[in-house]
Amino acid sequence: MTGRHPIAAVVLAWIFPGLGHWYLGRRRLAVAFAAIVTAMFVLGLSFHGRLWLPVAGQPMSYVWSFADFGAGALQLAGRALVDRPEGDLLAVTHEYGTVYLATAGLMNLLLMLEVWDIATGRKSKEKEPA
Amino acid sequence: MIALVPADHFLIMTIYALLVSGFFALLWREGKRERWKLFGILLASLVLGGLAVAWLMYPFPR
């Protein structure tokens, strides 16, 4: 156990990539994960990818939405900042962008699972220098 | 949103491979040497695998 609350670590990890690791004292890893996931997400937006919302009658839209919501505050900010969260279907990079955005969300979901394992003592990581 | 990267398919695929490889190397391995090793393996697999699939699909454009 790390002495930190696992649920708080998971919630922080969802809010912003790397925040859960930062809370658990893995600061260098936190910065690296934040940089990677944020870069993936911002590139996805710049490629005019789609931030999905569930659509009745389209089962796959729930899967894409689940992946996108994994990015936490990033996807909320993305929806607020871009003109068209549904992306630009005519852009040659639209599908790449959609995959980048979903991958950023899925990466953050993995980070949430990892901070849970670290906080509950199921996974021990090397100590970082202070 | 401005274009941060030119619309080049190979470049976009390679950037994706770099980010995914870096992510999993940090997530799955401990120690600098082990991380670099996994990073290289993943990067090579993704880029070369992508090229191989593209080559295999070449005779079937539609």
Image (cartoon, coloured by chain):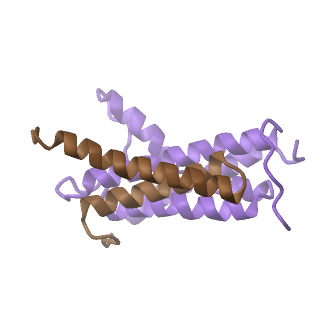
Judging depth in this view, the residue of B33 and A49 nearest the camera is B33
Judging depth in this view, the residue of B9 and A72 nearest the camera is B9
The number of discs equals 0
> Where does the image place residue A13, in percent across and percent down from the top left?
66, 51
- Whether residue A79 is visible: no
Quadrant hosting residue B61: top left
- Whether residue B13 is visible: yes
Chain drawn brown, letter?
B
User: Would you say A68 lies left or right of A86 here?
Assistant: right
Q: Quadrant of the C terminus of chain B?
A: top left
> Where does the image place residue B9, in percent across and percent down from the top left?
25, 59
Q: Chain A is drawn in which colour?
A: purple
Up/down of B49 relative to A22, above or below: above
Q: In which quarter of the image is the N terminus of chain B?
A: bottom left
Q: Which residue is drawn at 79% across and 53% down?
A: A24
Q: Residue at x 50, y 47 (%)?
A: A105
Quadrant hosting residue B35: bottom right
Q: Residue at x 54, y 47 (%)?
A: A107
Judging depth in this view, the residue of B19 and B51 nearest the camera is B51
